[in-house]
Image (cartoon, helix red, strand yellow):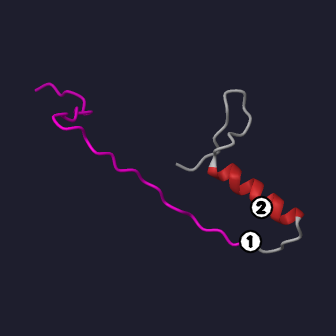
């Protein structure tokens, strides 16, 4: 998902990675840097299912 995350009142969310990058670029510019190399970092999370817990189906029921 590529978007800017905002709070309910429309202000940028402090934890939004795109906002963090924008602030870092502004800071580097104010410090006189003219080059700033960045790259994406993919994140994912694996969760261990509790023993005896069954996964619920998210598929819609279909009628014959």
User: Quarter of the image holding residue 64?
Assistant: top left
Point out the tag, 2 or 1, that comes first from the N-terminus.
Answer: 2
Question: Looking at the image, how many numbered discs can be counted on the residues?
Answer: 2
Instruction: Give percent across and percent down for residue 30.
Output: 89, 62
CB atoms of marks 2 and 1 within 8 Å: yes
Which segment did they paint magenta?
36-64
| Residue 56 among those drawn in magenta | yes
Secondary structure that dominates the magenta span:
loop
Q: Nearer the viewer, residue 52 or 11?
A: 52
SS class of the residue under badge 2? helix
Residue at the limit of the structure toward the top, as seen here? 63
Instruction: Give percent across and percent down for residue 20.
Output: 69, 52
Mark 2 residue crowding within 10 angstroms, few (<14) / some (14–19) / many (20+): some
Residue 58, compared with residue 46, is above or below; it is above
Q: Nearer the viewer, residue 54 or 22?
A: 54
Q: Which residue is mark 2?
A: 25
Instruction: Give percent across and percent down for residue 23.
Output: 77, 54
Q: Nearer the viewer, residue 55 or 10?
A: 55
Residue at the limit of the structure toward the left, as seen here? 64
Residue 50, compared with residue 35, is above or below; it is above
What residue is at 22 percent from the left and 32 percent from the top?
56
Instruction: Give percent across and percent down for residue 18.
Output: 66, 52
| Residue 1 among those drawn in magenta | no
SS class of the residue under badge 1? loop
Q: Which residue is mark 1?
A: 36
Residue 6, compared with residue 19, is above or below; it is above
């Amino acid at each position: 998902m590529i978007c800017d995350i905002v709070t309910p009142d429309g202000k940028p969310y402090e934890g939004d990675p795109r906002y963090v990058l924008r602030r870092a670029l502004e800071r580097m510019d104010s410090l006189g840097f003219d080059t700033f190399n960045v790259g994406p970092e993919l994140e994912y999370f694996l969760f261990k299912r509790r023993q005896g817990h069954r996964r619920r189906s998210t598929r819609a029921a279909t009628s014959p």
